[in-house]
Image (cartoon, rainbow, N blue to C red):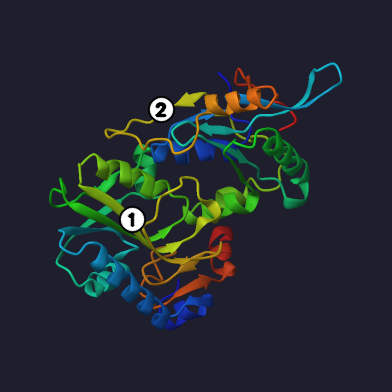
Amino acid sequence: MTERLADLHDDVGEILLDEATISAKVQELGSRISADYAGQQLTLVSVLKGSLPFMADLMRAIEIPVRIDLMEVSSYGGTATESSGLVRILKDLSASIADEHVLIVEDIIDTGLTLNYLIRYLRGKAPATLRICTLLDKPARRLVEIPVDYRGFTIPDQFVVGYGLDYGELYRNLRYVGVLKPEVYTEVAVG
Amino acid sequence: MAGFAHASEAEMSRILDFYAVRWEYEPHTFPILWNLEGDVVESFSPDFYLPDLDLYLELTTLRQKLVRKKNRKLRRLRELYPDLNIKLFYARDFRALMLKYGKLALFDGLSGTSGQVSQPALAATTREPTLDVDPVPAAAPSATAQARSARSAGRRPPVRSAGTKPSAT
């Protein structure tokens, strides 16, 4: 079990996006969003847990008034999977988004399955508009094509951690996005 | 009622169910080679059809060097049915999916096999997960449109399958 932050760094084989690169991109996205939604009431919906750091930085890079809300859905393979076999809303929005302009803030889009579900769910709440902002886009294994309105980085087909992204609930607090060494998860699978 | 041919297909069906994506198991068979008499001598039946996405999905957990035959058939399929929306999941893709969902050990028990289930096959036909909101509209032409496209190009439309798995896929 990795216990120290230094050990977490050792598990990363390559830094894909360093702190400065991420910060510059977040500022750029914030500026674009501020311009696009100028004069409108915008609600940012963060999808827990992975998008927390991105949400925290992005909302401060946006220069118009915004409301924020949080959602969490169960992931396949998690403990909720075994009991129901269906995705569950673990935390729903705390306020109505009817007739609001809503921007979903995601850490990464991979297969698109989770986001596809969320889009359908949130459309049922009748927002005025519903758009997508993701820090990372990994299109290699995309099953559901999602129209992404704001994209930070398109990344290669590698298992990445850091800046909110986890493996086994660890590595979220790394300030960069890095590629996890294969032996880290191979050892776990074998062990 | 047909069963899945491989445990990876059963696992994919559970993933699709989990995320409320409707799927059909091998609903269409596409002829890809005919003899001089016009009889179909080779066909391709993608594992899944996702009607809301108008997407066919083919899984293979075979080792990469054994995938050549499947790749050849897929190229032929795309030549004959260019409007067909199909995605091939290789072993490495399925492994990455299992890693993402914390089920890598499951993959390691499947990889490189001839594609047969080692456990009792799950029942498989068509599933419609429940969802209390409107589904996302399909962004691509429907399967019917694909069939029409194939006909208009002088090719034969996909053959309806009764849920059986052609041995060549």
Quarter in which the C terminus of chain B is drawn: top right
Q: Residues within 10 Å of mark 2 (few under 14, many from 20)?
A: few
Q: Are marks 2 and 1 on the same chain?
A: no
Give coordinates of residue A81: x percent, y percent: 38, 43
User: What label does residue A27 carry, if any?
Assistant: none
- Helix, strand or loop under label 1: strand
Other-residue count near label 1 (Cα within 10 Å), few / some / many at <14 / 14–19 / ≥20: some
Q: In x, y percent, where is residue A9? A: 47, 80
Q: Position of residue B96 (x, y in %)?
A: 55, 55
Side of A89 where B169 appears, left or right: right
Q: Is residue B87 above or below residue B168?
A: below
Residue in the image at 57% along x and 65% along y: A187
Query: Residue B151's quadrant in the figure?
Result: top right
Figure label count: 2
Residue under mark 2: which chain is it in?
B
Q: Is residue A137 above or below residue A26?
A: above
* Amino acid type, residue under disc 1 in the picture: Ile
Q: Name the kind of residue labelled 2 in the image.
A: Glu
- Whether residue A23 is visible to the viewer of this picture, yes or no, is yes
Above/below status of A140 relative to B139: below
The chain letter for the residue carrying disc 1 is A
From the image, tell me which residue sits under label 2.
Answer: B128
Q: Residue at x 64, y 36 (%)?
A: B118
| Residue B168 located left or right of residue A105 | right
The one nearer the camera, A39 or A178, is A39
Relative image position of residue A156 (x, y in whole percent): 55, 64
Give the structural element (helix, strand or loop) at label 2. loop
Residue at the spot of label 1:
A132
* In-front residue for pair B138/B111: B138
Q: Kindly report the distance in space between the C-alpha atoms of the residues bearing marks 2 and 1.
A: 26 Å
Q: Is any atom of residue B26 visible in this view? A: no
B148 or A47: nearer the viewer: B148
